Image: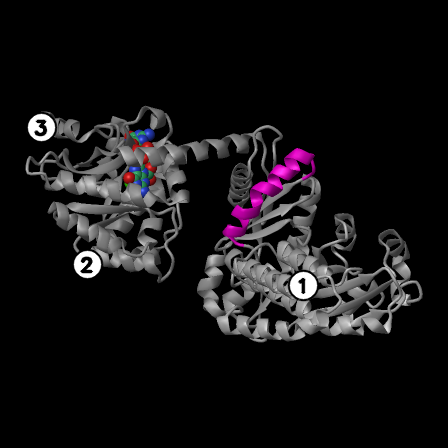
Amino acid sequence: MNLSANSAPVLTPKALREGQQRLRASLDTLKGRLISPDALLKGQQRVLELVARNAPVKETLSEIAALAEEAFPDMSASILYYDPKANVLRAGGYGRLPSSFADIVEGMVPGPDMGSCGTCAYTREPIISVDVFEDPLWANFVGLCNEYGIRSAWSTPLIDERDGSLLGVFGMYYPTVWSSERAIDISFAQDFHQLATIAAERHRDEQRSRHLATHDSQTGLGNRNLLNEQGDAIVNQAITNKTPLTVAFIDLDRFKPVRQQFGHAQSDHIFNQIAERMQQRLDCADLLIRFTGDEFVAFLPLPMDEAKRLLQDFAADLAVGFEMAEINLQITFSCGLATYDQDTSDMEMIIVQADEAARVAKQFGGDTIVIADQTLATRAKSRRNIRKMLDEALETDAIQPFYQPIMNLTTGRPKGFEALMRITDDKLKTVPIQDLIGVAEETGQIHRIGLKMFDAACKAVADPKDPLKGLSVNVNISVAQLMKVGTTDRILASLALYGADPARMCLELTESQWLDGDGAGRRTLMELHNAGLKLALDDFGTGYASLNYLRSLPFDIIKVDQSFVKLIGQDRQADALCETVLALGKACGLGVVAEGIETREQLKALTDMGFEMGQGYFWAKAMPVNVASQWVGDNFN
Ligand code: C2E
Ligand code: CA
Ligand code: CA
């Protein structure tokens, strides 16, 4: 029988037939043994069925062990399978030997003097110990032999014929000294040996495909599937046994620019080295997961202070740097640490808290480790609630735009509106919009929210009753939306669907979010601009925008952030900034809007400076579409 000679499928009908023929031929040797040829054939079939339906490897190997023992009445079989990752033998199948024996053998490391099985796994050669009490290989296991009545032993390696690797060891133990009569067993046992090889091969294949499904192909670290499979159990076990567990959320600092600077091949190479150093330093981790692009999660069986020291060591490992194109590249990370709370924790919650702490570390400028405390825990919980409620709101149309007028300061009349997201649902009403947007950006809900807002604005603009009185509408768009493939098409489709004039639509992009160099975001902006939409750079003065940024992207309008308008007339720098931005905008041929005008004094100061557009509570807050309509009708007819 040579069912294992080739790779899958292991059990072709032909292989099965051949195997059975061979087995039949060897049945002669059964004369005088306990098992009948029929029983043997049936037993073999049972085993192959177990293999075919992927039964647990221990079950299959135990079936084989029991079958072999039927054929050799005084023999005890022990089938071990090899775990190459841990380099240990695992207790596989047993018949007569009790589970206490299996417990002792479990985890045995192959070595030159490890009884017959451990030594066989080490040398990959069959080993016969004629008398275990005389054999130096067994010197360390005399007690075991006494306890389980073992006097001689014979072990053969199970080898994967496809690549020559070790799959396990088939061991046969006898209560008497080995005699030459037993030589016959060797040939007959071949068949059981082959069955065990098939079972172990199948197990190895399954482990491999499981590994592929649960590990990141680039770094070899675990992936989200592995986290979902094992995370809860690790947390629950720690909570039940009150053992230490610290979850580390590791977020590389500014890795995106590295990717841009060095390209994919080289930055992947650096990334893999980072993952490797991480794996080495955090090797005590119960789980080490690549969570998303540049983020990792480690489950460390350590108290908080020790976990923190370990992460500091890892930071030092990275500080050695990476040699790249004649420079030494320094990589740092922001890390959040969280542990469980005996009463309320579950895996997701701990990760959210660690993530939250990592976010704080990032706000400190990165290269920092922050421990999650009660405030962070509360914040993390509230974020999770917000996400759930946003989901519900998206389902129920509780998210709508309200319209705030943008004024022409020269004529004193409205020039357009800004559509601002409002929640009409009681549960979420109390949460500041900025926080809702923050959560939505993280969860990806911003895409649905953004489109909902844009659709509603298109509908209002194109409504034959013209509630917005022919004025234009600004809709906020998040950088995440711009980056997403298909955004241009989706936006153009909305315009077409509602019949809205693109020239009446303007997209506001906040300056505090970084738009990558030549990437997808820039492309989307260009496409939308070419389609006739206007573009505004929002919250100017708060972010990264350089002159270059302004020059190279097709903006039509800049909006000066309200924090500067607030200080106008009180703070020289704020005055100077407003004046400079206005001059800059005019020089570039851009419209400039002053945001957040609340008082007559602010309005006067700004008009004196030469501002021509403004927005703020001085005129109106954001209003539902019908109220906005009436507001224009009442005040400007
Ligand atoms: P923003 O785009 O800068 O919007 C202006 C914010 O200032 C609005 O806050 C508006 O209500 C408020 N505001 C207007 N005039 C005054 C004033 O005179 N005084 C004061 N104190 N505030 C004034 P809101 O609606 O809370 O929105 C906050 C931020 O949330 C927005 O800032 C924008 O960044 C974001 N946001 C709102 N709706 C959306 C949306 O649909 N999509 C996206 N991506 N972001 C949105
Ligand atoms: Ca805005
Ligand atoms: Ca703004």
Q: Is residue 437 left or right of residue 505?
A: right
Residue 490 in the image: above or below residue 3: above
Q: Is residue 127 visible?
A: yes
Helix, strand or loop for disc 1: loop
Give how far across and how far down residue 107 sits, in percent.
74, 56
Q: Amino acid at mark 2?
A: Asn
Q: Nearer the viewer, residue 136 or 362?
A: 136
Q: Is residue 270 left or right of residue 241?
A: left
Q: Label for residue 530?
A: 2
Residue 287 in the image: above or below residue 389: below
Give how far across and how far down residue 270 sits, in percent.
55, 65
Region of the chain picked out in magenta, as a range: 223-244
CA gap, disc 3 and disc 2 = 33 Å
Lower position in the chain sequence, tag 1 or tag 3: 1
Disc 1 packing (10 Å; few <14; some 14–19; many ≥20): some
Helix, strand or loop for disc 2: helix
Count of marks, rendered view = 3
Quadrant placement of the C terminus? top left
Q: Which residue is mark 3?
A: 633
Q: Which residue is mark 1?
A: 36
CA gap, disc 2 and disc 1 = 84 Å
Lower position in the chain sequence, tag 2 or tag 1: 1
Q: Nearer the viewer, residue 70 or 91?
A: 70
Lower position in the chain sequence, tag 3 or tag 2: 2
Nearest to the eye among marks 1 and 3: give it.
1
Residue 124 counted in the magenta span: no
Q: Amino acid at mark 1?
A: Ser
Residue 505 in the image: above or below residue 434: below
Helix, strand or loop for disc 3: helix
Q: Is residue 577 left or right of residue 213?
A: left
